[in-house]
Amino acid sequence: CGMVCTNMGVKAGKRIGVKGEIAAGAKSFVLNLGKDQANILLHFNPRFDVHGDARIIVCNSKDKGEWGAEQRESAFPFQEGTNVEIFITHDPSNLTIALPNNHQFKFPNRLGLQVIDFLNAEGDFTIKSIQLE
Ligand SMILES: CCCO[C@@H]1O[C@H](CO)[C@@H](O[C@@H]2O[C@H](CO)[C@H](O)[C@H](OCc3cn(Cc4cccc(C#CCN)c4)nn3)[C@H]2O)[C@H](O)[C@H]1NC(C)=O
């Protein structure tokens, strides 16, 4: 599995920047942000071609191990085999996810999490840098 960061201490109002490389021939990758593996504020899953989804971002949450309802985004400013930077701004009610090409969308803070301590990556993505600001 990919990189795991813990004890990040990102409070509301702060922004996390994740820079990484999308693998050539990528099918799907995941960024999870939250408290820990079982309490995920944002499961961010761009799907190039998997589960019958083609070039769709699927987002969800996980509360005490239980998945919530999926939210699908139509913007898909990702290319296999390229470097990309994604910004997530933490907020008590809505996260703002900023993507390349000035795309951005919001995802509800369903867990009401005040501090983001946990981040991990899965799948066809290699984290190169994480910026906390
Ligand atoms: C239509 C009836 C059926 O409905 C489908 O039912 C599936 C199963 O429930 C859902 O799919 C789940 O959706 C969830 C969010 O909701 C989650 O994304 C979860 O994946 C967790 C997960 C897996 N990984 C490991 C990993 C990740 C990415 C790359 C790799 C790799 C590699 C080497 N190249 C490995 N990390 N996290 C996914 O399986 C579909 O969306 C859903 N579809 C719809 C339309 O509803």
Image (cartoon, grey):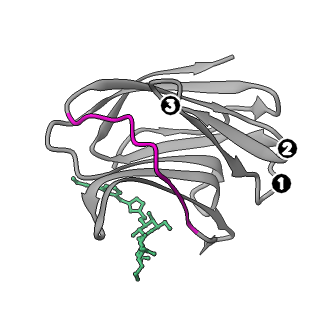
Residue 129 appears at what percent x and percent y?
A: 45, 20
Estimate the spatial distance between the alpha carbons at disc 2 and disc 3, rounded to whole Å: 21 Å
Estimate the spatial distance between the alpha carbons at disc 3 and disc 1, rounded to whole Å: 23 Å
Residue 132 appears at what percent x and percent y?
A: 64, 20
Residue 59 quadrant: bottom right
Identify residue type, mark 1: Gly
Residue marked by disc 2: 92
Residue marked by disc 3: 99
Quarter of the picture holding the C terminus: top right
Q: SS for tag 1?
A: loop
Q: Which secondary structure class fits the magenta region best? A: loop
Identify residue type, mark 3: Leu
Identify residue type, mark 2: Pro
- Badge 2 crowding class, 10 Å Cα cut-off, few under 14, some 14 to 19, many 20 or more, is some
Q: In this rendering, is residue 39 above or below 76?
A: below
Asked if marks 1 and 2 touch (Cβ < 8 Å), the reply is yes
Q: In this rendering, is residue 126 above or below 36?
A: above
The residue drawn where x is 49% and y is 44% is: 120
Tell which circle, 3 or 1, labels the residue nearer the N-terminal end: 3
Residue interval drawn in magenta: 70-80
Residue 88 is left or right of residue 129, and the answer is: right
Which mark, by number, is residue 112? 1
Q: In this rendering, is residue 78 above or below 85?
A: below
